[in-house]
Amino acid sequence: MLNRRHLRVKVLQSLYAYQQSERKDIKSFEKSLIQSVDKVDEMYIWMLSLINEVVQYADIDAVGRANKHLPTEADLKPNLKILGNTFITSLNKNKTYLAGIKKYKVLWDFDPELTKSLFATLKNSPDYAAYLAKTDDDVHSDKDIIKFIFKKVILKSSLAEQVFEDKFIYWPVDRDVLQALIAKTFKNFAYAEPEKNKLADVVVNWDDDREFIINLFQQTIRYDASFQEMITAKTQNWEPERIAQMDTLLMKLALAEFMYFPSIPVKVSINEYLEISKEFSTPKSNSFINGILDKILSELKSEGRIRKTGRGLME
C-alpha cells in the first residue's frame, strides 16, 4: 500500500517536475500528482493480469504440443492442473480485478513473446514440476506456485522489467510498493469462496491522503520564496550550485509540514525526509539536510512559528 512516505515521494516528484517546467500551471501538475497515485493501481492490475496470462498460457502451450508433427504421449496428455488453480480461479471472479482490467484496458497482445518466455521459464523449473506432481493441494499450496511465478519468474525476467519500465515512468520507485500490494493480495486470498477474497487497497483512506498530497504540493509552492530565504540564511558558507536541488526541495517540503501541517509531529517530518533523501539525493545529503533543518527549526520555535495540535504535539 502507498503509505505517507510513498505519498511524500509522489509530491517530491511532482514538485521537481513543476520546477523544471517553463509552464507553471499548478492545476495541471496537481492533476498529474493525483494520476501518479492512480498509476500505482494501474500497475498493480497489469501485474495481476500478467500472472494470470502466464497461467493461461499453459492451455496455449498444450495446443501447440498436441499439434507437433510427432507428438509424444506427454504432448498429447499434458498436465493442465494449473488452469484450475484456486488463486487464479478466484482472481478471475473478483469484481474489482475485472473492473480494473476494463478501466485500464489491459491486453497483453502487444507483446506475445513475453508471456511465452515467462511460461517457458515456469515450465522448466523444478518448482513447477513439484506442483504438478502434488496431489493434496489446498488454498495455500495453490498460492505457493503463484508466488513463485511472481517472485522467481516475472520479477527475475529482464523482458518483463523492460515492459513495466516502458509503461510506467515511476516503475523503479513504485516497484517496492507493487511487491507489497501483491504480497497483501496473497494474504487476502485465503478463502476457498471467491467472494471472500479481496484485492489490496492501494491507499487506505484516499480522501485524507488526497487532501494531504494536494495541500503539501500547494503550500510548498505558495511559500517557496520564504522557505528559500530560510535555507539561504543557514547556508551562507555554501556556494548555491553546490547544494543539490533535491536537497532544497526536501527541505522546503519539510518546512511546509513544520509550519502548515499542525497534526504532523516535527520529528515525523524530519525522519521521513531524511529517509527519502537516502534514496533520492547524494550520500552526504542526509547529514546536510538534518543540520540545516535543525537550525531553522530552532529559530522557528524561538519565534513561536511552530504551532502543533493534537497528534502533532508528540515528540
Image (spheres, rainbow, N blue to C red):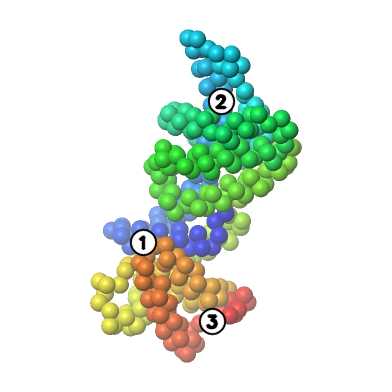
Q: Position of residue 264 (x, y in %)?
A: 56, 73
Query: Which residue corresponds to mark 1?
Result: 16
Mark 3 Cα shell of 10 Å, populated few (<14), some (14-19), many (≥20):
some
Q: Secondary structure at mark 1?
A: helix
Query: Where 295 sits versus 177, above or below?
Result: below
Disc 2 element: helix
Left or right: 41, with 191 as reference point: left
Q: Which residue is mark 3?
A: 307
Q: Which residue is painted at 50% across and 69% down in the image?
A: 272
Say which of marks 1 and 2 sits in front: 2
Using the image as rendered, state which of residue 309 and residue 65 is in the foreground. Answer: 65
Q: Earlier in the sequence, mark 3 or mark 2?
A: 2
Give the total number of marks visible in the rendering. 3
Three-letter residue code for mark 1: Tyr
Give how far across and how far down residue 4 sits, in percent. 54, 63
Residue 54: x and y in percent read 53, 32
Question: Looking at the image, can residue 133 be seen?
Answer: yes
Q: Dot 1: within a 10 Å radius of its alpha carbon, few (fewer than 14), some, or many (20 or more) residues?
A: some
Q: Quadrant of residue 219?
A: bottom left
The residue beneath circle 2 is 58
Q: Are marks 3 and 1 in contact (CB under 8 Å)?
A: no
Say what amino acid the circle numbered 3 marks: Arg
At which x and y percent is residue 212? 53, 64
- Give the Cα distance between marks 3 and 1: 28 Å
Horizontal placement of 299 versus 211: left or right? left
Q: What's the mark number on residue 45?
A: none
Q: Which residue is at 40% across, 58% downward?
A: 14
- Vertically, is 158 above or below 224? above
Q: Quadrant of the N terminus?
A: bottom right
- Nearer-N-terminus badge (1/2): 1
